[in-house]
Image (cartoon, rainbow, N blue to C red):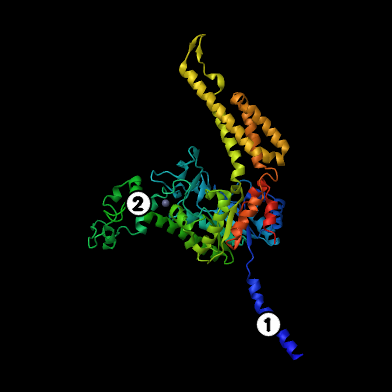
Amino acid sequence: MKTRIILFTLTLLMSFSFAPVASAQRREVHALWAHPTEAGKSAESVRALVAKCKRANIDVIVMDIKGSNGELYWKSKKFPQAIAKGYENFDMLAHLVREAHAAGIRVDAWLVDNLEGANGAAFREHPEWAQLNPDGETTLSEKLGKTRQYPYVWMCPARRPGYVDQWLVPLFEEIAANYQVDSVHHDYVRFPGDIGPDSYCFCDYCLKNIPRYAMLRYETRPDERYRVGTAQPRIEANWWSDPTMMPAEWDQMDRREKANFLLNGRTIPGGPPDLRHFFYDYRAHQIEILVRQVTEHVKKANPNVQVSAAVFKNPILSGRYLGQHWDQWTDWIDVYMPMTYRSHFAGSFDAYLDHLAEITARQMEWIGHKRPVYAGIASTYLFREEMQPFDEMRDRIADLRGLPPIDTMPSQVGAIVVDPDVERQKAALNTKRADLARAIGAAFETMSKRLSAVAPDREREIRSFVKVNIADNGRAATNESLDRLAKAVNDLRLDLPPGFLPPEKLVRAIEAARKANPDGIAIFAAGSLDREKLWPALETAFKR
Ligand SMILES: [Zn+2]
């Protein structure tokens, strides 16, 4: 009997001693980025979004509350002039927090940090806070692709007083103080990289402070010049001998000359053109200060609020190109959500799956496993192959519509004079027209089988529009018939029939990320899941 009790006690002890091991097993966190559109403008629409998330076992809703145009989706008391149209009387964030918490879901308040629109309140009131390139222009002067005007203004994160301390930090502070959010969330916490990665920022403040940051000259006795020492045979090995790095004429140089020196100058006269190292370092340092300040102010306003961040996939490359050296922010960031989207990878879908697993593991390594990493997957870009025909059709339809009408070029004056140049141009146009018609037809054929399997009526409808436009080598197409086709293709894209996109791609991407054993998976985004009809696939992948 006694032995039995001892045995029983032992078993009990053992089970207790094993219990913490079992409970220490991490539960994968499921996060989802979402936009105000999906939350809508009523208590019911917010509740519906939360219910959808609940069904898919989402633990964290990361809701955009400061958009790319600087517009705010909460009832800001500090900056009422920045509140988004239609949200003046509906406090979306307050509703979301209440509904989500009632469902056991956390809310991250997502702010687009350094981006404002051309009509954003911050830029309107303080144009002097914008980043400038060597020509003294803001990012509004840049192009996307070859022709598209860049619509956003990047604000200088360095300038003080300026955008960060006078606008952005107070916004974060207000959220932490007034809303029961679980976390705030950084996005665009960097310099621009898709446009002019080495062009910003050369505002007056930065021109003064890039050299000052690296102390490339003394403020005392600024006119004394020191020549580089020659104690060591390799010229750059004498860097410590205190040479004067800034040119004597610095103060007389214009913005372009100064920028050129900071990017292409030499730290050591006669050495390699390495001065841009300090430009990169300065930028990374400024973003790090921003991150630190936001965290300090947020935690002071409410110590229970965490700070998470959406970051580029590779902190070493983004450190150089964006000033986003996020592996160095572990003191300030509680959760990382790297945007390891397929759009940032060149290879096939299968190659992406391998690279996703590899880089997710590396991301955890880069931050020394000090903070949780949620692997960020964007559903849309998984379907590059399926969506490519849509882009192709849209672009070729636009090209065809842009050609001059068939009969506007008279090759005949009177009855007999034929202009051979005009005839040649006409022939070239006809060839072009025929090529475009063929391309439209071919693009449609690559999607038609998939489409007819899930929505035969829509396939037939679009096929009939295609047929009209490509008939007679494209010569039968009119502006109206092309517009009808373009609209049908676009409508299809915005509301894809269920099953058109293979849902297993989303499931396979999530499984690939899991190979790295990340702390969570973050999906971009609720709106895309709606359009792509992928909620059921997510429910399957996130089943517990
Ligand atoms: Zn600047």
Label 1: element kind: helix
Q: Quadrant of residue 395?
A: top right
Q: Is residue 232 in sight in this rendering?
A: yes
Mark 1 near mark 2, Cβ–Cβ under 8 Å? no
Residue 515 x %, y %: 59, 60
Q: Quadrant of the C terminus?
A: bottom right
Badge number at residue 262 = 2
Tell me, for residue 48, which label it has, or none. Answer: none
User: Alpha-carbon neighbours of circle 1 within 10 Å: few (<14), some, or many (≥20)?
Assistant: few
- Discs 1/2, front: 1
**Secondary structure under the numbered disc 2 in the rendered image:** helix
Q: How far, Cα to Cα, is label 1 from label 2? A: 67 Å
Q: Quadrant of the N terminus?
A: bottom right
The image shows residue 359 at horizontal and vertical percentages of 53, 58
Percent x, y of residue 85: 61, 46
Query: Residue at left 47%, top 15%?
Result: 419
- Asked if ligand 1 lies within 8 A of label 1, the reply is no
Three-letter amino acid code at disc 1? Leu
